[in-house]
Image (cartoon, rainbow, N blue to C red):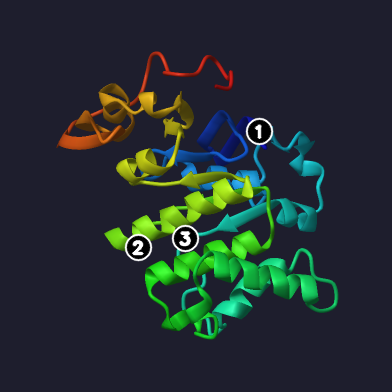
Amino acid sequence: MLTVEGIVFSYGVRLVLDSISLEVAEGEICSIMGNNGAGKSTLLKCILGVLRPRAGVVYLSGDDASRMARMELARRMGYVAQRDGQGARLTVFDAVLMGRRPHIGWAAGARDLEVVEEVISELNLGHLALRHLDELSGGELQKVMIARALAQEPGILLLDEPTSNLDLRNQLEVMETLGRAVEERGIAALMAIHDVNLALRFSRKFILLCGGSVFACGGPEVIDEESMEKVYGVKVEVETRGGLRMVVPVSACCVAGVNGERKGTRDGERV
């Protein structure tokens, strides 16, 4: 559903993304991972069209996103930003209704209200519908922001650190909510995330960014001791528990940069 080919982006003379290519399919959650400053959020904004890359193309189900009007993009891609909606006096119902803006004419119609009610029910937010956003916990607020994006009825969902600043329970609840939505709606999700083990639990595809390029792309097998040391500068042990890979940090190490072969990619070829 989402294909990215050769995205190049710079802030001034500083190259941030160098020929980034990836694909995310229907029903798939793909995690973008890498250190702070690796370009995860920048890549999401390039895909959204918020930032204009120097080169590269984004395709949505085969259609060139650069040729689409902004409202068309909003109907096809939903976005959940970091710490969005904090301090707002909107009710939960009104916040989710805002997700219908790409579909609404002069006023919200019966279909718009129906979609909002369905999404609120799907994400178990009914008891919060009349609460204001600034009265919610961090986990509740994040689920409302996911609900707002789902109310757009997008085919692709982009999320920037959806579990940042959440406690363990809320991290699990938010990710379980996302996993159900992707599976039941048959949409694709691409998320930037720091928590390696949380990503391993809920994703089946991974993009590791390092030095502005894709260091590794593939399934859980690319999350190994070598990748973690090169990408994060941390020595780890990778274990399997309950059928899932788990990364256990051992110690920090000094990594000057990434050179040599990039696992899972070959000179701009998508994996």
| Residue at (73, 37) in percent of width and height | 61
Residue at the disc numbered 1:
3
Percent from the top left, x then y, of residue 221?
Answer: 37, 24
Q: Nearer the viewer, mark 2 or mark 1?
A: 2
Which of the 4 image quarters holds residue 56?
top right
Q: Would residue 18 be found to the left or right of residue 252 on screen?
A: right
Residue at point 50% right, 85% down? 131
Instruction: Label 3, secondary structure: give it.
Output: loop
- The answer to whether any part of residue 44 appears in the image is yes
Question: What's the amino acid at mark 3?
Answer: Gln
Quadrant of the frame with the C terminus: top right
Q: Residue at (30%, 61%) from the top-left corner?
A: 169
Q: State whether residue 247 is above or below residue 137.
A: above
Task: Say which label, 2 or 3, has the lower sequence index.
Answer: 3
Mark 3 lies on residue: 82
Label 1's element?
Answer: strand
Query: What is the number of the mark on residue 261?
Result: none
Marks 2,1: beta carbons within 8 A: no
Q: Which x, y percent locates residue 120?
A: 57, 70
Q: Position of residue 157 (x, y in %)?
A: 59, 50
Q: Residues within 10 Å of mark 1 (few under 14, many from 20)?
A: some
State which tag comes first along the sequence, 2 or 1: 1
> What's the residue type where badge 1 is placed?
Thr
Q: Is residue 40 left or right of residue 234?
A: right
* Residue 50 pos. (x, y %): 65, 52
Residue at 72 percent across and 75 percent down: it is 113
Is residue 166 among the parts visible in the rendering?
A: no
Q: Which mark is residue 170?
A: 2
Q: Secondary structure at mark 2?
A: helix
